[in-house]
């Protein structure tokens, strides 16, 4: 008796080609997805860095202005703000001075007898910092214009980020 053996072992060439095509398509879609997430992450990193650093610096300057006794005019310029303050006084003194200015690519704060302290991370640089005194009636205020740029490590123009903040703050010396 002769039996017809229709039960074959193995895969046909068509089955192998279809399987390889499906796996290749799935890998291509996954790779594209991962690359898109990486690109999106790079863009948001720059935006987050400039927003956090600019906000932190502006908040600190605002806090110091609100608590200052007065603006120290001899050293206050368009690029430097000097304040007379009662806060954090050195021992034996009744008043001290706090300065804000650009130092290199950063914004620094210097208390009278201390060394300058950089206020931003190395991931950003100051684009511009301008101070101007505003008189509203008998109130003295300071207008602050601040621009912070992202230091783009990849030099990819799509990852550039910058933010400009403007604020006017009144002295609240009581």
Image (tube, grey):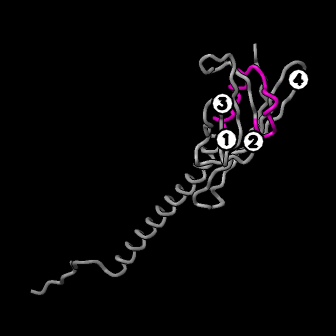
Q: Residue 39, image x and y in percent?
A: 56, 57
Q: Residue 26, image x and y in percent?
A: 44, 65
Q: Is residue 68 magenta?
A: yes
Q: Is residue 34 magenta?
A: no
Which mark sits nearer the N-terminus, 3 or 4?
3
The quarter of the displayed image where residue 8 is located:
bottom left
Q: Is residue 160 above or below residue 25?
A: above
Judging by the rendered image, the residue that carries numbered circle 3 is 60
Judging by the rendered image, the residue that carries numbered circle 4 is 136
Judging by the rendered image, the residue that carries numbered circle 2 is 129
| Local secondary structure at mark 3 | helix
- Label 2 neighbour load within 10 Å: few <14, some 14-19, many 20+: many
Which mark sits nearer the N-terminus, 3 or 1?
3
- Label 4 neighbour load within 10 Å: few <14, some 14-19, many 20+: few
Which mark sits nearer the N-terminus, 2 or 3?
3
Q: Which mark is residue 107?
A: 1
Q: CA distance from mark 2 to mark 4?
A: 22 Å
Circles 2 and 1 in contact, beta carbons < 8 Å: yes
Q: Which residues are magenta?
A: 54-80
1 relative position to 116: left or right: left
């Amino acid at each position: 008796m002769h039996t017809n053996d229709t039960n074959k072992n193995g895969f046909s060439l068509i089955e192998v080609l279809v399987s390889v095509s499906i796996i290749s398509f799935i890998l291509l879609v996954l790779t594209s997805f991962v690359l898109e997430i990486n690109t999106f992450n790079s863009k948001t990193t720059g935006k987050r860095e400039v927003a956090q650093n600019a906000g932190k610096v502006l908040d600190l300057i605002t806090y110091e202005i609100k608590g200052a006794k007065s603006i120290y005019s001899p050293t206050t310029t368009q690029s430097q703000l000097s304040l007379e303050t009662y806060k954090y006084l050195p021992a034996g003194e009744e008043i001290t001075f706090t300065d804000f200015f650009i130092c290199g690519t950063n914004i620094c704060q210097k208390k009278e007898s201390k060394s300058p302290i950089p206020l931003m991370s190395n991931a950003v640089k100051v684009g511009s910092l301008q101070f101007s005194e505003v008189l509203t009636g008998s109130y003295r205020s300071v207008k602050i214009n601040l621009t912070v740029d992202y230091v783009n490590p990849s030099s990819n123009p799509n990852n550039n980020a910058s933010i400009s903040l403007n604020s006017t703050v009144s002295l609240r010396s009581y």
